[in-house]
Image (spheres, grey):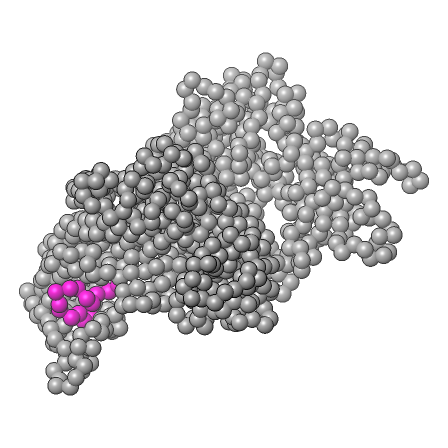
């Protein structure tokens, strides 16, 4: 560990009032987040004590505070660095004997109703949906516009998501119809059933429809004016759910699955009703089994401890599909609630408490969300300063949840604080400079009861620490009281990777923050107000010396473990799309990001970079600029813009501490490869790098599982298959790569210059000749191709079937479509933003209908185009391309190899790439290959579940294999040996 200064010795001029409680400090952790909490003796002792107390409570040995015979519950503590996202570092379960229904084996996968914790997921879906959060809700739900007691035009989506809309808390539900007579007995005037809302009143009428909610909201009273103050509202989230469905044209359940359940592997999180066999169902009446319908976004989800653990882990570790900056913004408060300690967010219920760490009192921020349903209550709380979350799920009388929440917070936050202070002792050192330029710098850090302090600072034996008061007085002394002798040091999130003496280290940025001795000397009243004013945040970074901030401290922390990067970026840089994803400590994410590898300009000259294309609503006359041509990166200016925006600005990692695995096509041009290597090392500065043929990555899968062949000893998933032939048919080309034990057999690699781009251009030409001029609408034609095309098992028969016949004698199959013709409904970019493929309808094209202008849609009939376009892969000569077809190239590839390898390769042909999605592709390929090889060879052709991402996952498996250490090149090796040596090493592969 090393302590570093700029020319100004990094002195601080921030202020702090010295009190028993650390009342004023930079927002965030007092000390660096604790790591490996689960293995800490301090944490283990606290967990054991709480477990013992809980056992005593449920057994009746101590007073629990709730009817323990009727309450089942599950508790968990989640850490930002736990080994398994779905496995908390501590958990406790209690299933009461009174639970006669539901599961008999309570565990982390058991299901509970989580009530308003649902709102967290609704807000997350809203953020990820691409909707304008500051747009008025009437933009998405015009039915709320017009005359209303609530000014809906002033209510934004953000206000709805943050309790600031003033929307009524509920609709229908607050009218307790079953207590009508009791209310009357208490003196309220009599009312008729017709005086109640028309829907949603329990015991009187049915649940509300969408239109009834919109109508009811226009006649309901607001709680507040918009943005006046927070007011809890379920209806705000019902309206949000309706707006989401209107914008996305998907149900809330589909959105939940798309953004949460599938990417985070949260299999037990979905709209109620849940699975009775897995459920924790309390005795008596409860909400279990209810269908919340339109109310689901407000509080209608089922979930489990393991699922909430996965979500909590991704948020704490900043591996959720949001940048660290976006997550930090999401956690910020939006408004103050009813006291000095409570704030609200989106949709957080935020507390700042100073009594959670009694031995070292300071304000700790809790970002929480509670939830409730009939006989269910839950709590999810994030303590981000410590990388910690707690989860409480209860079923039964609802008083148990707050008691359990308080017990867990008081136990585990204090324990995490002690662990952080214990681990921070490694910073308590004396730091010495290396006497460069005859300047000797000496410093030391120590902990007091509250934080880290700067205990010593000398330069050439001059005591700089004692001079801080004078430096402060010369600059800001007219504004602030006298600075005391104690200078505190606090960490920040600013850190980056560096090297010292050739060894990798982490450079952490800390900030100095002196105490204030006292307030202003005055006899006027109100001095106590100044003592409550934490002004330190406003003067940080105010005093510089030679361009360097005087309050900035750099601490270099060495890595005591393996020097190999713990983070690996896998890039399958295709011409059409980039498949990209990070691996942290050999943990492979469930899916890579699929990013359009393009910069586009529409007819209004608006520019769309990569994923921004998803926001485009008019693809007519769209112009595209692709950085990849014929499979190779040829435009680095465009490629770097896409990488920077989509990867390096979104993903939270530093290339200087990461490895890059980059997939490239076979037989790359040396000059283009050298450019790539130079940019990776010199411009991005990756610590380690491997550029390999993407097809070979597919060997790092359980190949037999792809063929669904049972084995007594299955192939290890990331061990390269013995022999496999990879056929990759993508956007630029189609390649055949035989692979032996993870190594490409270069002499047998074959390439067909037919890929998705050629097919799209060919379909464009056919349509423009036969139907409409689509030469400027290749994006639409590409979608048309993907929806409609298939590989014919009998090309001649299908061609005969689709022939129209002579002018005076139309063939019956042509008139009826013959089972081949399909109608493609073109988008109009007003009501239809995507084209759709529908069954052929002759009446849609009748002259009478056209003359009557009855059709509001442009329909294009596709006949033999559907199979003649993909036929180019098997017979490229149909379009004048002088190359053998795919099956012939397979035969040519085999002829370059010893015949002894043929059986193994032919039995393991795997097809990947977007073109292999065409129906009939693998059947046609297998049929034609069988015709060209010896009869004693078994031919098997398989397509993985997702042929587009299969190469990326192979690269991810390779990243976890020991082979990567032999294949990769470090930046130090690049700088020592040069680009030519790197090119030779990559070319040799495992042969080195």
Q: Where is residue 626 in the image (x, y as percent from the top left)?
A: 56, 52
Q: Position of residue 531 (x, y in %)?
A: 18, 74
Which of the pair 470/202 is nearer the observer?
Answer: 202
Q: Where is residue 496 in the image (x, y as percent from the top left)?
A: 29, 54
In the image, 725: left or right of 108? right
Magenta stretch: give its range.
Answer: 14-28
The quadrant of the picture occupied by the C terminus is top left
Q: Residue at 21% of width from left, 65% of height from top?
A: 25
Which residue is outermost to the front? 185
> Magenta includes 802?
no
Q: Residue at 55% of width from left, 67% of height from top?
A: 219
Which residue is outermost to the bottom? 524
Which residue is outermost to the top? 936
Q: How many marks?
A: 0
Q: Residue at 51% of width from left, 24% of height from top?
A: 708
> Magenta includes 20?
yes
Which of the pair 248/737 is nearer the observer?
Answer: 248
Q: How would you classify the magenta stretch by its main secondary structure?
A: loop
């Amino acid at each position: 560990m090393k302590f570093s200064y700029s020319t100004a010795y990094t002195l601080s001029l921030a202020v702090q009032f010295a009190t028993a409680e650390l009342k004023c400090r930079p927002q965030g952790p007092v000390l660096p987040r604790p790591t490996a909490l689960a293995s800490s003796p301090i944490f283990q002792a606290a967990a054991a004590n709480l477990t013992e107390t809980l056992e005593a409570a449920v057994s009746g040995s101590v007073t629990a505070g709730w009817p323990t015979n009727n309450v089942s519950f599950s508790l968990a503590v989640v850490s930002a660095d736990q080994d398994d996202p779905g496995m908390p570092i501590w958990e406790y379960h209690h299933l009461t004997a009174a639970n006669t229904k539901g599961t008999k084996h309570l565990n982390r996968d058991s299901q509970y109703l989580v009530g308003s914790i649902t709102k967290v997921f609704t807000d997350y879906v809203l953020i990820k949906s691409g909707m304008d959060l500051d747009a008025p809700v009437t933009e998405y739900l015009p039915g709320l516009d017009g005359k209303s007691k609530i000014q809906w035009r002033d209510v934004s989506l953000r206000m709805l998501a943050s309790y600031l809309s003033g929307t009524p808390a509920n609709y229908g539900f607050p009218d307790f119809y079953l207590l009508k007579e009791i209310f009357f007995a208490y003196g309220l005037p009599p009312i008729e059933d017709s005086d109640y809302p028309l829907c949603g009143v329990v015991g009187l009428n049915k649940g509300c429809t969408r239109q009834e909610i919109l109508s009811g909201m226009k006649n309901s009273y607001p709680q507040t004016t918009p943005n006046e103050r927070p007011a809890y509202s379920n209806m705000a989230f019902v309206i949000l759910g309706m707006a989401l469905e209107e914008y996305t044209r998907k149900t809330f359940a589909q959105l939940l699955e798309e953004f949460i359940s599938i990417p985070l592997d949260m299999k037990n999180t979905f709209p109620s009703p849940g699975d009775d066999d897995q459920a924790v169902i309390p005795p008596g009446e409860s909400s279990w089994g209810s269908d919340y319908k339109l109310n689901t976004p407000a509080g209608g989800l089922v979930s489990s401890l393991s699922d909430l653990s996965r979500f909590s882990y991704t948020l704490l570790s900043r591996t959720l599909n949001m940048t660290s900056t976006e997550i930090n913004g999401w956690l910020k408060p939006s408004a103050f609630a009813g006291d000095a300690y409570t704030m609200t967010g989106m949709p957080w219920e935020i507390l700042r408490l100073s009594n959670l760490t009694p031995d070292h009192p300071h304000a700790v921020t809790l970002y929480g969300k509670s939830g409730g349903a009939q006989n269910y209550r839950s709590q999810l709380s994030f303590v981000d300063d410590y990388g910690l979350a707690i989860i409480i799920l209860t079923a039964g009388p609802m008083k148990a949840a707050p008691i359990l929440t308080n017990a867990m917070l008081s136990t585990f936050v204090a324990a995490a604080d002690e662990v952080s202070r214990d681990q921070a002792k490694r910073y308590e050192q004396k730091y010495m400079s290396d006497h460069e330029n005859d300047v000797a710098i000496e410093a030391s850090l120590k902990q007091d009861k509250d934080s880290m302090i700067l205990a010593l600072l000398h330069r050439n034996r001059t005591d700089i620490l004692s001079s801080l008061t004078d430096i402060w007085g010369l600059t800001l002394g007219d504004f602030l009281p006298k600075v005391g002798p104690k200078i505190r040091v606090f960490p920040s999130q600013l850190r980056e990777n560096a090297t010292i003496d050739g060894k990798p280290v982490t450079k952490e940025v800390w900030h100095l923050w002196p105490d204030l001795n006292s307030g202003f000397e005055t006899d006027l009243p109100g001095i106590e107000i100044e003592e409550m004013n934490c002004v330190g945040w406003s003067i940080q970074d105010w005093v510089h010396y030679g361009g360097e901030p005087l309050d900035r401290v750099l601490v270099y922390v060495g890595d005591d473990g393996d020097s190999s990067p713990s983070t690996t970026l896998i890039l399958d840089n295709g011409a059409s799309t980039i498949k990209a994803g990070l691996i942290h400590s050999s943990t492979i994410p469930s899916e890579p990001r699929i990013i359009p590898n393009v910069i586009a300009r529409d007819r209004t000259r608006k520019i769309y970079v990569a994923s921004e294309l998803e926001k485009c609503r008019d693809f007519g006359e769209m112009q595209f600029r692709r950085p990849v041509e014929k499979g190779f990166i040829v435009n680095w200016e465009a490629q770097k813009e896409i990488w920077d925006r989509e990867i390096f600005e979104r993903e939270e990692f530093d290339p200087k501490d990461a490895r890059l695995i980059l997939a490239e096509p076979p037989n790359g041009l040396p000059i283009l490869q050298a450019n790539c290597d130079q940019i990776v090392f010199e411009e991005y500065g990756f610590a380690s790098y491997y550029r390999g043929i993407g097809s070979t990555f597919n060997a790092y899968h359980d190949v037999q599982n792809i063929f669904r062949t049972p084995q007594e000893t299955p192939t290890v998933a990331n061990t390269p298959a013995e022999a496999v032939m990879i056929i990759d048919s993508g956007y630029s080309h189609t390649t055949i790569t035989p692979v032996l034990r993870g190594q490409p057999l270069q002499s047998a690699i074959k390439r067909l210059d037919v890929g998705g781009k050629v097919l799209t251009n060919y379909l464009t030409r056919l349509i423009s000749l036969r139907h409409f001029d689509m030469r400027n609408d290749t994006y639409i034609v590409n979608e048309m191709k993907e929806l409609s095309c298939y590989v014919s098992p009998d090309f001649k028969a299908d061609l005969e079937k689709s022939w129209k016949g002579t002018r005076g004698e139309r063939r019956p199959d042509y008139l009826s479509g013959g089972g081949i013709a399909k109608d493609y409904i073109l988008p109009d970019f007003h009501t239809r933003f995507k084209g759709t493929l529908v069954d052929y309808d002759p009446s849609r094209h009748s002259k009478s209908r056209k003359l009557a202008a009855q059709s509001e849609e442009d329909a294009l009939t596709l006949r033999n185009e559907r199979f003649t376009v993909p036929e180019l892969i098997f017979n490229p000569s149909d379009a004048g391309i002088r190359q053998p077809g795919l099956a012939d190239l397979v035969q040519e590839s085999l002829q370059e190899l010893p015949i002894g390898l043929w059986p193994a390769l032919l039995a393991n042909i795997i097809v990947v790439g977007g073109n292999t999605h065409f129906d009939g592709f693998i059947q046609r390929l297998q049929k034609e290959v069988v015709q060209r090889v010896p009869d004693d060879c078994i031919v098997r052709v398989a397509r993985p579940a997702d042929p587009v991402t299969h190469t990326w996952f192979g690269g991810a498996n390779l990243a976890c294999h020991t082979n990567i250490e032999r294949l990769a090149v470090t930046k130090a090796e690049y700088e020592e040996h040069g680009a030519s040596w790197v090119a030779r090493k990559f070319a040799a592969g495992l042969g080195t």
